[in-house]
Image (cartoon, rainbow, N blue to C red):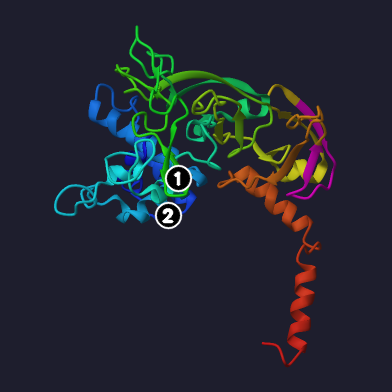
Amino acid sequence: MSARDWIEKDFYGELGVSSSATAEEIKKSYRKLARELHPDANPGDAAAESRFKSVSEAYAVLSDPEKRRQYDEARSLFGGGRGGFDGFSGGNTGFDFGNIFGGGGGAGGGQGAGGGGGFSDLFGGLFGKRGGGAGSANRARRGSDVEAEVRIEFVDAVKGATVLLRLSSPTTCGTCGGDGAAPGTSPRICPSCSGSGLVTRNQGAFAFSEPCRDCRGNGKIIDTPCGECGGDGISTRTRALNIRIPAGVEDGQQIRLSGQGEPGRNGASAGDLYVRVHVSPHEVFGRSGNDLTLSVPVTFPELALGTTLTIPTLDSSVTVRVPSGTASGRVLRVRGRGVVRKDGQAGDLLITLQVHVPSTVDDKARAALEAYAEASAGADPRAGLNALLQEKKKDPGET
């Protein structure tokens, strides 16, 4: 992307956020727009696809702290890109903005000399120059990381699974293979900078390096740009990836796939793909860390007299013994029947016993309950609370 593109395009406007938006606000807005404009959600809609590409381009810059800093600095120097370059070239100003990036005439000596060498040297830091070394404007640059989301079932999260992810993101252009030239043609070395991407201008006793205006700092000239990517070498495409979800992944966890992000520039490595996993809740089981949880309804006689229960697990069942006199809410632990950790150790299955109270009882059951209540009238389960109430009544300072 050229310097002119960075200033003319309003990336904040594309994402619908302010220039002071936080990284999280930018990410949230991008995800919302990406879902609405995704080609899969708008088949055959060229306008939505074009908008999706613009939103993806904006996020690629604003999600990278260094790119965003450079973008903000460039826009602040030239009025935030309002009205493109009209305020700096043409009209009655007599000022050609192209001089700043190496274009136009003007007094001065040296190769393609022009005024504003100092400004050009400043912009070398914004658009590729690092340390002023020859060829640094055309340096290799690692591709940006890409984020995606996937939803899986509870059982797949516990046991692991392979899921198909359809991802629309910047990738190496399939038509030109990434060199930006139309099929049957090839880029040629820029004769102005000999492929370095930088030209040196002399101004008195000083020499300044700036991006070459003929190749825009790329070091190569494409006479016939690729029709798919417009000469950029990168296009937004929908690709299918088989993602391996490891056993034990938790809701909201990110999985990193090295080299599956945005392609690098000038031979640099690609960025990474970060897949955030969302786990659908299970209708019966819950999870606490590496332990599985399960609430099991039981009757009062089962707790009072003791019983043996057959409890389902994710893949089979287990038998547990409930001792007589067990209180409602007690948790029984079945070791090794939870989530298997990375080190091979497994969590436990935690079974919470809850007394089931029927909403209605028939005459026979009611008579039995009344008989039990009469037989156990001497046992007061609230004896401790009653004693506390008596103490409160004796204390005149309490109400």
Report which quarter residue 379 is drawn in.
bottom right
Quarter of the image that includes the C terminus: bottom right
Marks 2/1: CA distance? 21 Å
- Left or right of 69 on screen, residue 309: right
Image height of 161 relative to 89, above or below: above
Neighbor class of circle 2 (other Cα within 10 Å; few <14, some 14-19, many 20+) is few
Report which quarter residue 238 is drawn in.
top left
Q: Which residue reaches farthest bottom?
A: 396
Please name the amino acid that badge 1 sits on.
Leu
In the image, the segment drawn in magenta is: 318-333
Image height of 167 relative to 330, above or below: above
Nearest the camera: 252 or 382?
252
Q: Which residue reaches farthest top?
A: 184
Judging by the rendered image, the residue that carries numbered circle 2 is: 21
Tag nearer the camera, 2 or 1? 1
- Left or right of 133 on screen, residue 313: right
Which residue sits at x=28%, y=22%?
43
The x, y position of residue 273, in whole percent, is 55, 30
Nearest the camera: 145 or 357?
145
Residue 87, disc: none
The x, y position of residue 344, in whole percent, is 81, 27
- Left or right of 193 on screen, residue 272: right
Image height of 229 relative to 398, above or below: above
Judging by the rendered image, the residue that carries numbered circle 1 is: 126
Neighbor class of circle 1 (other Cα within 10 Å; few <14, some 14-19, many 20+) is many
